[in-house]
Image (cartoon, rainbow, N blue to C red):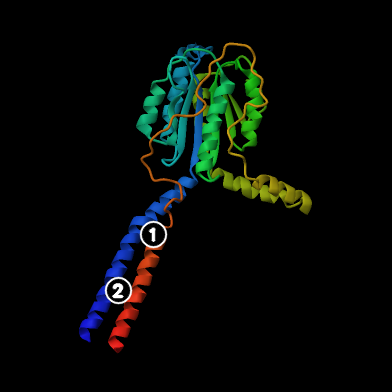
């Protein structure tokens, strides 16, 4: 009798220890997956055309490209560790435009990518805006439409494919990707100045560093207050109007790549970069839900096994 009770208590103790170990192993993993789903995502589209090698009109000692690189380096440490960031450039000096494919921030690797940027060639801005936006849309699909998505454009000249910029920019913004543009030492505002979510002029090195710092320092936490203010603003509206606004704001955006269907290409020489970013091997945990129910199923099996074991022991005892 005492031996039977001892075995039962031992079984319960082993089961409890086993479940505790499962909790330690799987709960942090599930939390990491949940955190990854809500990650912020930023693609920095850096103009590395030949004109970025020029110095500022107000400072003959510093080039526009080097100042932009310094600004990115200085602000990197202020970004959250779990942010996804990408560095996309247009320059004929590089065989690939993705010097840092969109992914989790690895400071040393990102700094090396920034340091290696070399300027040369023209300004095919529209083509590269599409490429950056497509990478963000693909990432949003992986995150099941959670998280925030931003395209930061740093440029100093007119786009040679202005027709593509005109066609792609509304499509990008309609997919709820925030677009911020910094015009570097330009004689007049960039063509995107009155179209995008934010535009900043950077006529000297200090303004460029400040503009990059302010944009990249913004986090998704600041949007919470904005949403609360939004509900306060719609309170005086009629029910029908408020309902329409809420439905429009809550509509799930499309994650399909920015299309080329309605864009006619002019007969001019143009760069044709790859349409997708290179595939990288992730060292972090997967954000998909494949196998996500494994811990619960295993715990359920253990509980059922325990119940069946005690039922069997009870019947054996009665016989």
Query: Callout 2 environment at 10 Å: few (<14), some (14 to 19), or many (20+)?
Result: few
User: Looking at the picture, how far across and down is residue 5, in whole percent?
Assistant: 25, 82
Question: Which type of secondary structure does the marked residue at label 1 adopt?
Answer: helix
Badge number at residue 12: 2
Q: Is residue 207 above or below residue 19?
A: above
Residue at the outermost left position: 3
Against 169, is 283 above or below?
below
Judging by the rendered image, the residue that carries numbered circle 1 is 295
Residue at point 63% right, 34% down? 173
Query: Along the line of sight, which residue is nearer the eye, 165 or 148?
Result: 165
Image position of 76 (left or right of 273): left
Outermost residue to the bottom: 318
Indicate the quadrant where residue 301 lies.
Answer: bottom left
Q: Is residue 248 left or right of residue 225?
A: right
Q: In the image as oriented, which residue stretches furthest toward the front?
A: 319
Label 2 element class: helix
Residue 222 image position (x, y, % from top left): 56, 43
Query: Which residue is more in the foreground, 229 or 282?
Result: 282
Image quarter hosting the C terminus: bottom left
Q: Position of residue 53 (x, y in %)?
A: 47, 12
Question: Vertical placement of 227 versus 262: above or below?
Answer: below
Image quadrant where one finds the N terminus: bottom left
User: Label 1 to label 2, Cα distance in Å?
Assistant: 19 Å
The mark tally for this picture is 2
Residue 191 appearing in the image: no
Q: Nearer the viewer, residue 39 or 73?
A: 39
Seen at 77% across and 54% down, the residue is 239
């Amino acid at each position: 009798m005492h031996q039977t009770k001892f075995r039962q208590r031992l079984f319960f103790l082993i089961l409890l220890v086993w479940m505790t170990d499962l909790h330690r192993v799987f709960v942090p993993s599930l939390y990491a997956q949940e955190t990854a789903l809500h990650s912020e995502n930023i693609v920095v589209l850096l103009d590395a055309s030949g004109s970025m090698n020029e110095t500022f009109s107000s400072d003959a000692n510093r080039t526009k490209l080097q100042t932009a690189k310094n600004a990115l380096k200085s602000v990197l440490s202020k970004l959250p560790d779990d942010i996804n960031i990408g560095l996309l450039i247009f320059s004929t000096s590089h065989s690939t435009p993705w010097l840092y494919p969109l992914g989790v921030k690895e400071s040393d690797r990102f700094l090396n990518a920034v340091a290696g940027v070399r300027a040369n060639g023209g300004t095919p801005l529209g083509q590269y805006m599409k490429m950056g936006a497509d990478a963000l849309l693909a990432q949003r699909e992986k995150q099941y439409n959670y998280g925030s998505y931003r395209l930061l454009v740093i440029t100093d000249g007119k786009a040679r494919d202005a027709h593509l910029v005109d066609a792609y920019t509304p499509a990008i913004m309609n997919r709820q990707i925030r677009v911020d543009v910094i015009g570097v030492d330009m004689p007049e505002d960039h063509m995107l100045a009155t179209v995008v979510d934010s535009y900043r002029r950077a006529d000297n090195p200090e303004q460029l560093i400040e503009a990059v710092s302010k944009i990249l320092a913004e986090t998704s936490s600041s949007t919470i207050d904005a949403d609360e203010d939004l509900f306060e603003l719609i309170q005086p509206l009629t029910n029908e109007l408020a309902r329409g606004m809420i439905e429009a704001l809550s509509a799930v955006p499309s994650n399909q790549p920015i299309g080329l269907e309605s864009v006619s290409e002019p007969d001019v020489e143009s760069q044709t970069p790859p349409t997708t970013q290179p595939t990288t091997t992730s060292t972090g945990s997967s954000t998909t839900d494949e196998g996500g129910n494994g811990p619960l199923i295993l715990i359920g099996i253990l509980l059922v096994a325990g119940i069946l074991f005690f039922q069997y022991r009870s019947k054996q005892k009665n016989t």
